[in-house]
Image (cartoon, helix red, strand yellow):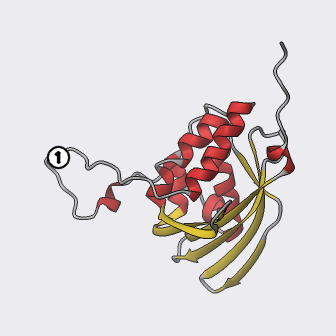
Amino acid sequence: MIRALLCLSALTLAAQGPPPLPLPAPAPSGKVSSNPLKEVVRADLAPTEVGTPEALTESLYAFISGPKDQKRNVEKIRALFHLQARIMVAARHPEKGPFLRPMDLESFLSFAPAQWEQTGFFERGTGLTVQKQDGLAQVWSPYEIRLAADGPAMFTGINAIQCAWDGKRWWITHLEFQSTPTAALQAKPPEPAK
């Protein structure tokens, strides 16, 4: 339990700390793309997963959540987001105060799924407000984070999700989130039996 809590705290700090180092350049394969974003693998998603801003938000929670050691389907997570989407973590450093950490989707995916798979990670929406005007939507979704589906909430927070309609489906174009530790995370774990 202590290790799981440390890993979850590490995920939060990783999201709040400096951006991850750039990925090493791939070895030449003979075929070079002028746009590396064209080379990323994206899953095909059903209209029930991306047909409304509400469905898009529920799909996000479903795709990132799962027990420890369960591989996340990164292609499905990636397919929720527009290729030029941005992610912003609004955080608070214990000594320096509030700050923002922007990143692109690939930077986020370079570390987050591995952390989710190491600790177990269940993010569940606790509410949903959608403001929509034609092909744009703003989703406000408070959430809780747990290590196990039936475990105590370790963090609460809110997702601010901007979505856009391209004539066929909705895309996440910007995701901003902020989390706060709960009393369950701050509580001292029980001492192991001797």
Residue at x-position 17% and y-position 46%: 28
Judged left or right of residue 88, residue 23 is left
Extreme residue toward the top, this view: 194
Q: Nearer the viewer, residue 130 or 166?
A: 130
Residue 189 coordinates in the image, percent (x, y)? 82, 33
| Quarter of the view holding residue 32 | bottom left
Please state, as top left, top right, bottom left or bottom right, where the C terminus lies in the image.
Answer: top right
Who's the residue at 67% across and 77% down the image?
A: 138
- Residue type of the residue flagged with mark 1: Pro
Seen at 69% across and 64% down, the residue is 178
- What x and y, as percent, mark residue 150? 84, 39
Q: Residues within 10 Å of mark 1 (few under 14, many from 20)?
A: few
Q: Is residue 72 visible?
A: no
Find residue 188 and report its horizontal and vertical position in percent: 83, 37
- Secondary element at image label 1: loop
Q: Which residue is mark 1?
A: 28
Is residue 65 found left or right of 74 in the rendered image? right
Residue at the extreme left: 30
Quarter of the figure that contains the N terminus = top right
As drawn, 128 above or below 152: below
Write the residue at 83% across / 25% down. 191
